[in-house]
Amino acid sequence: MTADTDTRSLNRMALSATLHCLTGCAIGEVAGLIIGMALGLGAVATILLAVTLAFLFGFGLSTLPLLRAGMTFSMALPLVLAADTLSIATMEVVDNFIMAIVPGAMSSGLTHPLFWITMTFSLVAAFFAAYPVNKYLLKKNRGHALVMKYHTKHTHHH
């Protein structure tokens, strides 16, 4: 295997890991913001709800393939926490920072384009912030490297 092939493989794995984390984060983040705004919660409570749901969905999406591969929940959870925590945390900091600093984004309401444009931009920015984090972790045989073999081995449709 050449260094170029190794780099492409690492880049593909980092892309896959980042997209995987982004999926869980986006589901939880959007759900949390929708619920918080619909219930009329303040910005801080809404962001806390969104972050909590982002971690739950992110960890959940990583846990399911491990459970399907035959792992017990108590075996899967430490792997998932080690694999995803830094990536999800990076995404959440970037995503929520952007949502908080764009004037009117959090208070514009769910039917206003400003909310959805800012949300889309913040998730894209979160992806680009987490990609080098995942790449670094994979280089060190950490992060998604800990669970990738279970995701690809047992879930071809994932």
Image (tube, helix red, strand yellow):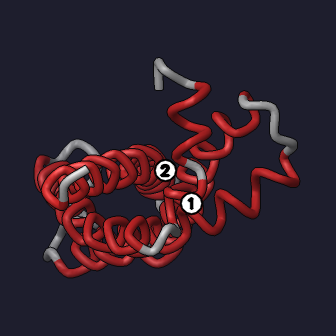
Q: Residue at x 61, y 26 (%)?
A: 154
Q: Is residue 97 visible?
A: yes
Q: Which mark is residue 55?
A: 1
Three-letter amino acid code of the residue under disc 2: Gly
Q: Residue 127: x percent and y percent?
A: 25, 60
Q: Residue at x 61, y 39 (%)?
A: 150
- Whether the residues at callouts 1 and 2 have beta carbons within 8 Å, the answer is yes
Q: Nearer the viewer, residue 49 or 4?
A: 4
Q: SS at mark 2? A: helix
Spatial CA distance of label 1 from label 2 is 7 Å
Disc 1 versus disc 2: nearer the observer: 1
Q: Which residue is mark 2?
A: 28
Q: Is residue 75 left or right of residue 93?
A: right
Q: Is residue 141 left or right of residue 108?
A: right
Q: Residue 140: x percent and y percent?
A: 45, 74
Q: Is residue 86 above or below residue 67?
A: below
Q: Earlier in the sequence, mark 1 or mark 2?
A: 2
Q: Nearer the viewer, residue 48 or 87?
A: 87
Q: Residue at x 69, y 59 (%)?
A: 79
Q: Nearer the viewer, residue 22 or 153?
A: 153
